Amino acid sequence: MSELYAGVDLGGTSIKCALAGADGEIVCQRSIPTESHAGPNSVLMRIAELVNEMQAEVGQSISAVGMGVPGLVDVERGVTRFLPNLTTHWENVPAGDILSAAIGCPVKLLNDVRTATLGELAFGRGREVDTMVFIAIGTGIGGGVVIDGKLRLGALGAAGELGHQTIDPNGPLCGCGNHGCLETLASGTALAAEGIRLMLMGLAPTLHDLVDGDPARVTAELMSQAALSDPPVLDAIYGAADDIGTGVANVMVTLHPELVILGGGVANIGDVLFDRVRAQVIRRVRMISPDTVRIEPSDLGSRAGVLGAIALASRGLGTG
């Protein structure tokens, strides 16, 4: 019987877990609420219980666990450094050792977006190339860099924080302390904030109807539905796409990857976004032929994180 691995995608609101072989064929998957208010030890014990229940369900023990976490992690030691989206921020929590003791097998930790990058590399469009960049555009913006078929982490394990490149030096203050980061201009949070502003000013009647006037329901995806009827909403999407395109152009001239993959909720806007991003890259990157500029959507979607965790458990940071 082939070896089985567990992949865990730890998020701010939910924990996704799957069991699969090294080929990424999922045999069992579950999701539970994170409940981070209960503290790191409680969350980790619930993850261990979930994995153990799933092992019992399939009747086979796993060989290793990979887990993507939303923040900075000491990859070598399996210690979380700072997870801003979880209560108490999980500073210096030996999550790898705690889970390993509770589950009975090795546990590897990695930042969640870098984990999703591994998913794209092992099971998505990244299989086609040696050099690629993955950019996740959701609540925030993160990324991962693959060179010569291997995920590159940098000295502190933080290589790929593409959402914190400066696009507008005089732009909005970012949570990182800088002004004008890409994340402040083109993330799902930033785009929704602009949609709310337009709606409250009476400039987005279709969007208003889609959310029944409730600002809390505004998302990038709903804005894309309203864009054809609400020109200011379309302009907001174009503005975000231009900023994303500028960020991708910076990546292109720095790394010249064969492929840039865009994932996350904002990428679900589709061709309206991608066509504008590609046009901006072609406009700004003059030294590279447009024919070599491949900017594609993720074909794994929301599965990238958990599949990347499977790849982390079974293959480490390379392709195999």
Image (cartoon, grey):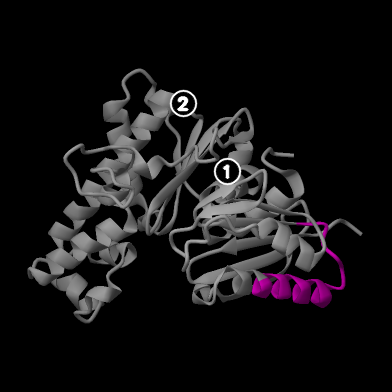
Does label 2 or label 1 sit earlier along the sequence? 1
Residue 46 in the image: above or below residue 108: below
> Is 195 or 82 nearer to us in this picture?
82
Residue 180 forms part of the magenta stretch: no
| Disc 1 target residue | 125
Q: Position of residue 86 (x, y in %)?
A: 47, 65
Label pair 2/1, CB-CB below 8 angstroms: no
Q: Can residue 240 be seen in this view?
A: yes
Quadrant in which residue 226 is drawn: bottom left
Q: Position of residue 80 (x, y in %)?
A: 57, 54
Q: Is residue 279 visible?
A: no
Looking at the rendering, the stretch of residues picked out in magenta corresponds to 45-64
- For label 2, the SS is helix
| Disc 2 target residue | 255
The residue sitting at 19% across, 54% down in the picture is: 236
Q: Residue furthest bottom?
A: 212
Q: Position of residue 294 (x, y in %)?
A: 45, 35
Q: Comparing marks 2 and 1, which lies closer to the viewer?
A: 2
The residue sitting at 59% across, 40% down in the picture is: 126
Is 133 positioned to the left or the right of 235 in the image?
Answer: right
Q: Residue furthest right?
A: 1
Residue 53 forms part of the magenta stretch: yes
